Image (tube, grey):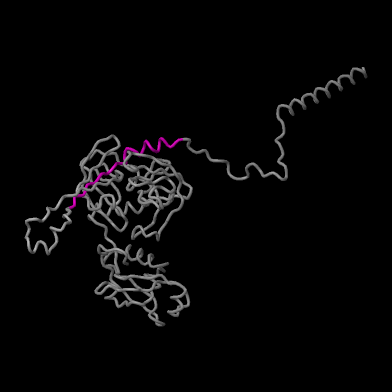
Amino acid sequence: MRRLLSFALISIAAGLAAAFFAVKLLNPPAPQAHPDQPAISRGLPPQPGPVSYASAVEATAHSVVNIYTTKVSIKRGNSLFDDPLFRRFFGERFTTQPRKRTQTSLGSGVIVAEKGFILTNHHVIAEADEIRVVLANGRTLKAELAGTDPDTDLAVIRADAEDLPAITMGDSDHLRVGDVVLAIGNPYGVGQTVTMGIVGATGRSHLGINTFENFIQTDAAINPGNSGGALVNAHGQLVGINTAIFSRTGGSDGIGFAIPISLAKGVMEQILKRGRVVRGWLGIAGQDITPELAESFGLSRIEGVVISAVLEGGPADLAGLEPGDVITRINDRVPDDSQGVLDMVSSLPPGSLVEIRGWRGKQSLRLEAVISERPKIRKES
């Protein structure tokens, strides 16, 4: 009996051992990282991304158009017969007749409303006598200018059709550096082309391209002919209007700039409502405060803008501002530089009263000015 019990205990122990090794074989332990090796992943799990952006292109490409413009100029002959002294003695008998010269250019645009309104760049249609729009399906339409804003290099044209596919607007205010973007346009006139890149920076300014600048920078290839085309996100939404490139060769060097759609929408709405963009104006030219200027003006802090010129009869002149005055506050807002003054003033509606504080020499300055509408000039506040 005692032998049978021992045999049973031995059998049970053998069975448990066999089960233990089977579990080990089926569920091997996770490998331990060597102390000198980095952990495989300690952060968030990787987010899966699309392997293709074809859906984004399909949702937007039909809303991007090619724009062809024609400008006719009169060119007079340049010969001895056109010399005033020659004409004085011989009259008009030998004068050469002026000749018509036709110039063509190309660009891109984005359909923003079914009634035929297309958003593009001002420089694409500037001084054009004829504008033609070619849709993605090859259909050609005549277009006319609805309004333009040279200060942001934006324009709205209207094609002769009311059944056009409008693009879906996106949110450019929440773009992040690293977001994937697609540039759609007509580079070099080869036809509609899509290039891909990422957002390299937002809020780019002080580039000297436009009066008002707030560019999206991208490495999506932008070339001549892309101007006015669409910059869309990976979801197929319009986030910018492609405008310019930074290049030493004339081609894409991986630095392109697009106007955020948040800015473009505001300009477009004013053009469609008033036919023009209305901005506030003060009538001054400013210069940024540098350490040298701060020392010469006896300023304890490097802040504000020095007025370098005041337009006679303008709002600033009527308010009593003078060249050499330093502006440190506009309605309790502190301008970072002369561009900041320009942006603050332009955002105010004409007729509004603005308080200006600063310094005149060592005396504090506090004045009020009535903002007027900004005329069609450049490089002034």
In the image, farthest residue toward the right: 2
Q: Position of residue 122 (x, y in %)?
A: 28, 52
Looking at the rendered image, the quarter that the N terminus falls into is top right
Question: Residue 264 versus residue 127: which sits nearer the camera?
Answer: 127
Image quadrant in which you'd find residue 366? bottom left
Determine whether 110 is above or below 294 in the image. above
Residue 68 part of the magenta segment: yes
At horizontal 45% and vertical 76% (from top left) the residue drawn is 294
Per the rendered image, the range of residues in magenta is 52-73
| In the displayed structure image, the side of residue 36 where residue 66 appears, left or right | left
Determine whether 180 is above or below 277 in the image. above
Question: Residue 370 versus residue 194: which sits nearer the camera?
Answer: 194
Determine whether 304 is above or below 238 in the image. below
Residue 378 part of the magenta segment: no
Count of marks, rendered view: 0
Q: Position of residue 322 (x, y in %)?
A: 32, 77
At horizontal 41% and vertical 35% (from top left) the residue drawn is 54
Q: Position of residue 15 (x, y in %)?
A: 80, 22
Looking at the rendered image, the quarter that the C terminus falls into is bottom left
At horizontal 50% and vertical 38% (from top left) the residue drawn is 49
